[in-house]
Structure formats: structure tokens, C-alpha cells
Amino acid sequence: MNGRLTSILRLWPTALAVLALLGAWQLAASTGAIADALGLDSFLVPSPAEIGDSLWTDRSLLADNAWVTLQEVVAGFAAALALGIATAVLLHLSPLARRISYPLVIASQTIPVIVIAPVLVVWFGFGIGPKVAIIALICFFPIAVNALDGLGTVPAEQRKLMRSLGAGRLRVLTMLEAPTALPFVLSGAKIAAAVAVIGAVFGEWAGANDGLGHLMLVDNAQLEVPRMFAAMVWLSAMAIALFGLLSMIERRIAWWGAAEHGPQAEAGGR
Amino acid sequence: MLAGIELEVAPGETLALVGPSGCGKSTLLELVAGLQPLQAGSIEIDGDPSPAARTARSAWMPQRDLLLPWKRAADNAAVALRLAGGDRRESRRRAGAMLHRLGLSGFADALPGELSGGMRQRVAVARTLLAGTPVLLLDEPFAALDAITRGELQTWLRATLASEHRSTLLVTHDVEEALYVADRAAILTPRPAAVTAVIEAPAIPAAARADAISDPAFVAARAAALKSLGAAA
């Protein structure tokens, strides 16, 4: 209770800053200051009130499209989580596999998603498949790299101890390395959650019949600017919710944190 | 790195290995534990020289407690039991009984982060004992503790080992700890480590550590050990 209260109090400055920003925006947009400065028609520069109005009047349209995007995000994120962890475990257990495929893992991150998205649409069509693949591709890297780092942080001495107490390679992994890596995996997952939504939008821009990214394209063509912003609000709310959910899970199942080995390892000089 | 070490430890006996820092004492323990490949010579436990057999028959305890931060004290102590396929409940029960015996009643559900250094070290000893192996390999178990706690834990370890029928190798750089806790102390030279002297710990039945270490026989043994150590260095 006390902790919750202090965390609410800590949010006050942020809330005030956001409110001040929205207020300034409202003022600048409704007086036409932004549009004049940019040399635009004023209907192209929506005020927060107009965006709020669109959020309300188009709520079912936005919600329907958000549902589509959310499904893509969750599926892509889940695939990246499974593949990322599996890859990290494989690379951790096999130095050979690591030598062969670590460069590929890094390469997977250097491919510009915006380039690969249209190719996937050509191959797999307008359905959910290409979006899931793109989101998974974006989310895979932070999860795999963090998981691999986490598995590698276990001190050799601790591994020896487990062996001395009767652990085989598999039990060292499940009883020691996996729990040690868990906070790292969740850090990676939080980064992935933040970018997953971006992947969904790219995927939908490359070709889709629905989803928030698709809606934004349509609105763009029709100069429905307030609704574009409303779709953005939905997208960022989705990313924040996913991030928050993961933070909650982290506090629940990985409360010991990733730093435990640090200071202890330094104390072990001999 | 090691040369000319020939030692034997009987069941129920504690042998201390005393030597200067970096002489290879820790390496010797890891060799006995089968955690490092042996380059020459042989080490046997119950007559079996294979490293796997030695790993199975010994439990190694390094200087750092290395408790798993996400496991409660009883679960940390029970690690070896769980690894041996023991059921969680029964393992916890046995670990709880061991912690009770080692003076940690009421701390079975504490997390490592909530325990003091001395308590953590006791949990680590409990974990080592619960491995149930005939050989215990303790590598400077109290070196990271403050002097007062170390003295307390020496008394405690002496009593604990006396009630166990195990063969114990205790690595330490503290002559006093060696002669107080162990039955014999082997003094090692710097690299390559070799045994220069084996000093028998005087049999002093004194209950208090302060009395035991000021006993004339103990003082004489300590002087002899320090002299061998000095000559070796």
C-alpha cells in the first residue's frame, strides 16, 4: 500500500509534464499557430481535443483494428520468445553452433525490416503470417542476445559447485543457468515488446486489409489526420501495456534481479 | 604446479592443507573433487581413481557460499538431495532438520539475501553435508568472514565434523584454524607445492576455543607449524 502510494507520488511530475504538453499543443493547434507556422490548412493539424473526439466516435473501428494488430503482436512476440530462448540455449550449450550461427543471429538484426516486409507479403499474402514473421524478426534479437548473455553470466565456480553436488549438464542448465538468465530474458523481452508494435505497423504497411497500421494508411490517403493520431495512441498504449505486463511478470518471477552475481563475483578474488 | 604430495585421510578424519596463497591448495581440492583433469599421479577415494567416482563421492565447498539467490535457505541446503532425485517435500524436511542441527532453526524459509555472512556459510556447510558423500572438501570456508564470526564458526565446524563420520580436507592459510578444526595439518611449500611437514593437532578436550588455542600443547604445535611454513616460504 505504502509502496503503491509512493510510486503514484513519483508519477506526479511525469503526469504534470504530459498535461502541460497537451495543454500547449491544444492551445497551439486550436489557435492555428502550428498550421500557420507550417503553412498548412488547419484541419491537417488536429488538436488533442479532436484526437480525443476521434478516439471516442471511431472507438469501435479503432478497437476492431487494434484487436487485429494485437493478435499479430502477441503471436509475433511469442514466436520470438520461443525461438530466441531456444537459440540462446543451443548456442550456449554448443560452442560449435555458436561459432556457426552467432554471425547469422547478428545478421538477422541488420536486415532492414522495411525492406523485407514487402517480400514476405509477396510470399505469404495479406494475412497474419507476414506480420507475425516481421514482428518475430524484430523481437528475436534482443531476446536471444539477452538470454545468451544471461546464460553466460554464471560464474565457472558456481557451475563446478553444482557438478560437485551431483548435477549433470542438463541440471546445471535447468537448476542454475536458466534461473540466472531469467531476469536477462525478461529485460530483452521488454525491449522486444516496445519494438513489436513498430514491426506490426511495418508489416501492415507492406500489405494488409485491416489493423491499426492499415487504418493509418487509409486515413492518410483520406486526410483523416485526427484518426491517424488516434491510431497512434492505440498503438503506443498497446506497447506500454505489453511492457507493463512484462515488468509485472518480472517482479513476480525474477525478483532477485540480474545484478546478484556482480558484487558477489568481485568478492571472490583469491 | 603440484609436486610430491602424498597424503591419506582416514574415514572420520580431518586433514588441513596449509600453505601460502597461490601454492595450489585450491587446485588440489578441485583435483580431488574430479572437477579438473589430473595431469600426473593418482587420487583415489575408497580405492577408486576415476574422476567421475571422485566427483560422486566428494562434496566441494568453495570460499564463497554461492547460495542461489532465488532459493530459500532450506532449498539451497537441499540442492544435492534434489539433484539426487529426492522429492521436494522430503528434501526440504531433511534440509530443515540439518539447518536446525547446525543452529539455524527458524531460518529455513529465509532467502540468502536476508542472512548474514556467517549464516550463509552455515547454510553452505549444510548443503555440503547433505550431499551425503564420504569425503568433504572445504576450501577456505571462513576466509571471507570477520574474525569474530570466523572464530565462532571454527568452534562450530569442529563440533559438526566430530559428529560426522566423514573424511574432510580443509584448505586454509590460517595455521590456528588448521590445528583447531583438523586432526592433522599438512604444511605445503609455494609452487610447485610439496608437503614439508605434517603436524598432529594436539588433543585438547577444552570446550572453549579461547582456552584450547592458549593451551601450551596447542601453542607448541602452532609454533612448529608456523616454523615449517616459514621455512617453506
Image: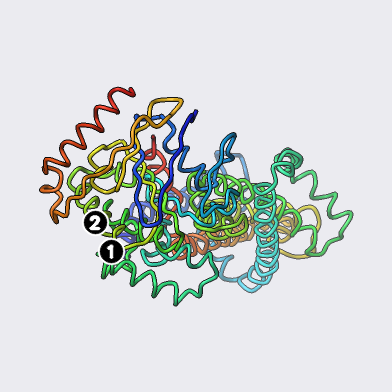
In the image, what residue type sits under mark 2? Answer: Trp
Marks 2 and 1, how far apart in space? 8 Å
Which residue was labeled with disc 2?
A: B156
Question: Is there any visible trace of residue B114 in the rendered image?
Answer: no
Q: What element carries label 2?
A: helix
Q: Position of residue B72 (x, y in %)?
A: 38, 65
Query: Which one is in front, B54 or A268?
Result: B54
Q: Which residue lies furthest to the bottom in this view?
A: B89
Q: What element carries label 1?
A: loop
Q: Where is residue A142 in the image (x, y as percent from the top left)?
A: 61, 48
Question: Is there any visible trace of residue B32 in the rendered image?
Answer: yes
What coloring was used for the rendering? rainbow
Q: Judge from the rendering whether residue B178 lies leftward or rightward of residue B71; answer left or right.
A: left
| Residue at (21, 45) in percent of width and height | B202
Q: Where is residue B19 in the image (x, y as percent from the top left)?
A: 35, 32
Quadrant of image for the C terminus of chain B: top left
Question: Which chain does the residue under circle 2 lie in?
Answer: B
Which residue was labeled with disc 1?
A: B102
In the image, what residue type sits under mark 1? Answer: Leu
* Whether label 2 touches label 1, CB < 8 Å: yes
Query: Which one is in front, A201 or A252?
Result: A252
Q: How many numbered circles does the render carry?
A: 2
Query: Which one is in front, A124 or A164?
Result: A164
Upstream in sequence: badge 2 or badge 1:
1
